[in-house]
Amino acid sequence: MLAGEVDLGAPPGLVAQLAELAPGAELVVQPGAGHYPWLDDADKFTATVSTFLRFQPR
């Protein structure tokens, strides 16, 4: 799961609690990002999502 560091709608603490409920879930917090991390830092968001997609177990 990906959370923006300063997201007021889905704050990292809440997303961390959700991640604990999903087996195998991992939390990544994008520094300086709000609710739309792809707008706040598109390069960081793309790198994070690309890494996630590359390393999915089959």
Image (cartoon, rainbow, N blue to C red):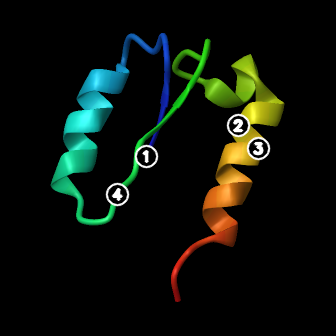
Identify the disc placed on residue 27.
Answer: none
Quick check: 15 above or below 49?
Answer: above
Quick check: 25 above or below 29?
Answer: below
Identify the disc placed on residue 1.
Answer: 1
Q: Secondary structure at mark 3?
A: helix
Q: Earlier in the sequence, mark 4 or mark 3?
A: 4
Give the image location of residue 1, x and y in percent.
43, 46
Query: What amino acid is at disc 3?
Result: Thr
Mark 4 → mark 1, Cα distance in angstroms: 7 Å
Please tell me in which quadrant of the rendered image residue 12 appears.
Answer: top left
Mark 4 → mark 3, Cα distance in angstroms: 19 Å
Residue at numbered disc 4: 25
Regarding residue 8, the answer to whether it shows in the image is yes
Q: Residues within 10 Å of mark 3 (few under 14, many from 20)?
A: few
Mark 2 → mark 4, Cα distance in angstroms: 18 Å
Residue at numbered disc 2: 45
Q: Residues within 10 Å of mark 2 (few under 14, many from 20)?
A: some
Q: Tell me whether the residue at label 4 lies in contact with that at label 1, contact meaning CB atoms closer than 8 angstroms.
A: yes
Query: What amino acid is at disc 2?
Result: Phe
Query: What amino acid is at disc 1?
Result: Met
Give the image location of residue 44, x and y in percent.
75, 33
Q: Tell me whether the residue at label 2 lies in contact with that at label 3, contact meaning CB atoms closer than 8 angstroms.
A: yes
Give the image location of residue 45, x and y in percent.
70, 37
